[in-house]
Structures are given as C-alpha cells and as structure tokens.
Amino acid sequence: MKKIKVMIVDDSAVVRQVLSVGLAEYAGIEVIGTAADPLFAMDKMQRDWPDVIVLDVEMPRMDGISFLKKLMAERPTPVVICSTLTEKGAATTMEALAAGAVAIVTKPQSGLRQFLVEATEELVNAIKVASVARLKRLSAPAPQPVAAKLNADAILPASSASAMTRTTERIIAIGTSTGGTQALEYVLTSLPRVCPGMVIVQHMPERFTAAFAERLNGLCQIEVLEARHGDRVIPGRALIAPGGRHMLLKRSGAQYVVDIIDGPPVCRHKPSVDVLFRSTARAAGANATGIIMTGMGDDGARGLREMLDAGAFTYGQDEASCVVYGMPKEARKLGAVNREVPLEQIPACIMRNER
C-alpha cells in the first residue's frame, strides 16, 4: 500500500519535531521533510513533492496564506492547516480555507508539546481526508471508523407524527464538511438579497465558525450569522451552526427559530448535519428543501432521508464538483436525494421551489 507523503511547514521546531515523531508511528504515512518557512519548503518539495502539506499560517519570510495561494495557482496540493486557536488565528484560517486548504487542526497557545502528542490521531485523520480531496480528481476509500458512532437519536428522537401543514415560507437546510467552506462561499455569494431563510451545518472547530460567518457576511448580499439560541430564520438570512454545539430548527408560532444545544457528537460531529436535518423534517416538513454537499463520511444521509419522507425536496452535490464525494454519496445510496446537481446549480435550486 502506497504511503501518503507529508511535508510539515511550521516555524516552530517543537511542532516540526513532535509531529514528525508522531506521524512516523502510522504505517500509511511518511514524513518526507520539514521546513521552517514556505521558501525552505519549496526548495525541498522540488526534489520530492508531497501528497499532503501540513501548514502553519503565521511564519517569517512568507506567510502560509501567500504560500497556499501560490500552490493552488501553480501546482494544487492538498493542505491541512495547523493553526493556533485564537480570534486572529481563526480569521486567518478562514482565509486559508477560502484559498483552498482542505482541513483544520487547531493547536493551543500553551501546553503545545502535550497537545500535539494527544492530537496526532486527529491530524492523521485530517491527512487521510486531504489525501483523497479532488484537487487532482483523486479517488480512495474513506478512513475506517475508530470509535463508536452515535446517530441523531442521541439528541432528538425520531417522530412518527406528520410535519406541520404546508405554508408559503420556505426553509433551506444545508449540510457540508470537507471542501464546504469554498462551496458555501460560492453558493451564498451567488444568492440575491431576497431568498429563503437558511440553516447550515459546516463541520468546523469551535470559534472558527464565528470567523467563517463574519467573512461570508462581508462578501454576500444576504445576512450570514453564527447562530445563537433563539435566532429567527427569516428570508435573506443564513444561520451557521456554531462549532461545538448542535443546531435544531424549531417552530415558534408563525416563526422558525433555532435552538443551540450541547450534547454528544452525532456521527462523530458536533454540530451534526443529521441533527439539523431531523429537526428540519419535524419542524418544516414539505416547506423545507434539504441540500447535502461535499464532505467525508455519512453525516446527514439519514437526516436527509427523513426530510424527504416528510415531504421536503432534496438535493445532493454531484461527484464531479465535490472535493470529497462522501456525504452526498451516502445520502444517494439511502435513496435520500431527489436530484444530484453540480455546485454551480445549487444557488438556482435554492431559489426554485420544487415539489
């Protein structure tokens, strides 16, 4: 089995040393080199090009964002961002994701060595996901599960009752993961100011969702917010579930609102797409449209099927336009998708009321 060749680019000698040792323990990964900044990295990479780059964003001589943009323009290569969890770092990391990075692994400002030892498995999973990203139309099996996986029953029991009767107010529920930050930016920036209200789960660490929503809000005609408990879902507004919390759609009289709650990860994610989709099936029924987009794994597949069974029209992003065709594929296998469409058609699907 071919090993995944990894280059580590970080100005911290501790990070480079600890990650190199940690990754060396995994048979499927080979660290082919480390570099203190992108200029050193480029020199080494010309001799042996990596499959995946683990990249810091704040470095001397050339910052990680500039390096990433250069890579994507000249020789697209999957990149995992390893960034410090700060407000400033979150905003910079959002810029990196927009420039083409595939995944994020966060590191703290203190206790770095111990954290890196404990987080090696998380980084390994991120590297595996990045290695199958379709920057070069790669194809490979998903990583094998490593822990028990809960379903949406852990947060919200399934309902046998029919959803509310149809009204004129539509709700759009979107779920996405790997590659979703770029895909969502394309979709949301394409929408006019007057469009259906949206609830969105993007798998992302805590605190990064606020920076993500803020960035999109500055680019879009619509209002994009990190959701807070009790926020209304109204036309022209997209609410993004906060990292580390589940988001549920609820009906409050004539209005739709969101509940932001704690709880165990569902399908190993918090927020979970399955939780959002199940709550949308219960609260909105045929008044909703469900959209599942690029991402690894199967979170959202069962929830989308519940939306379809409740009368919602459902879309899946097609394989050709996905960075990772995992979540839409699993939803299609469950018969949860009315129609598969390329990314470029999703904005029109949001504006079109199909039944």
Image (tube, grey):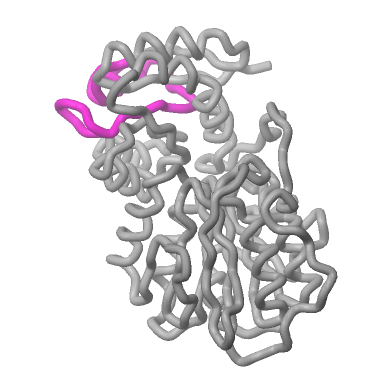
Point out the stretch of residues depicted in magenta: 35-63
Task: Say if the magenta span includes residue 62.
Answer: yes
- Front residue of this view, candidates 4 and 103: 103
Q: Residue at x 45, y 66 (%)?
A: 239
Say whether residue 304 is left or right of residue 2.
right
Q: Residue at x 67, y 49 (%)?
A: 299
| Quadrant placement of the N terminus | top right
Q: Residue at x 28, y 47 (%)?
A: 91
Task: Say if the magenta span includes residue 243.
Answer: no
On the image, the x and y values in percent for residue 66 come to 24, 39
Image position of 315 with respect to 319: above or below? below
Image position of 5 with respect to 85: above or below? above
On the image, the x and y values in percent for residue 42 come to 30, 23
Image quadrant assignment for residue 74: top left
Q: Residue furthest right?
A: 160
Image quadrant assignment for residue 79: top left
| Quadrant placement of the C terminus | bottom right
Image quadrant assignment for residue 350: bottom right
Regarding residue 187, the answer to whether it shows in the image is no
- Front residue of this view, candidates 18 and 66: 18
On the image, the x and y values in percent for residue 59 come to 21, 27
Q: Residue at x 46, y 15 (%)?
A: 117
Q: Residue furthest bottom?
A: 168
Say whether residue 330 is left or right of residue 178.
right
Regarding residue 56, the answer to whether it shows in the image is yes
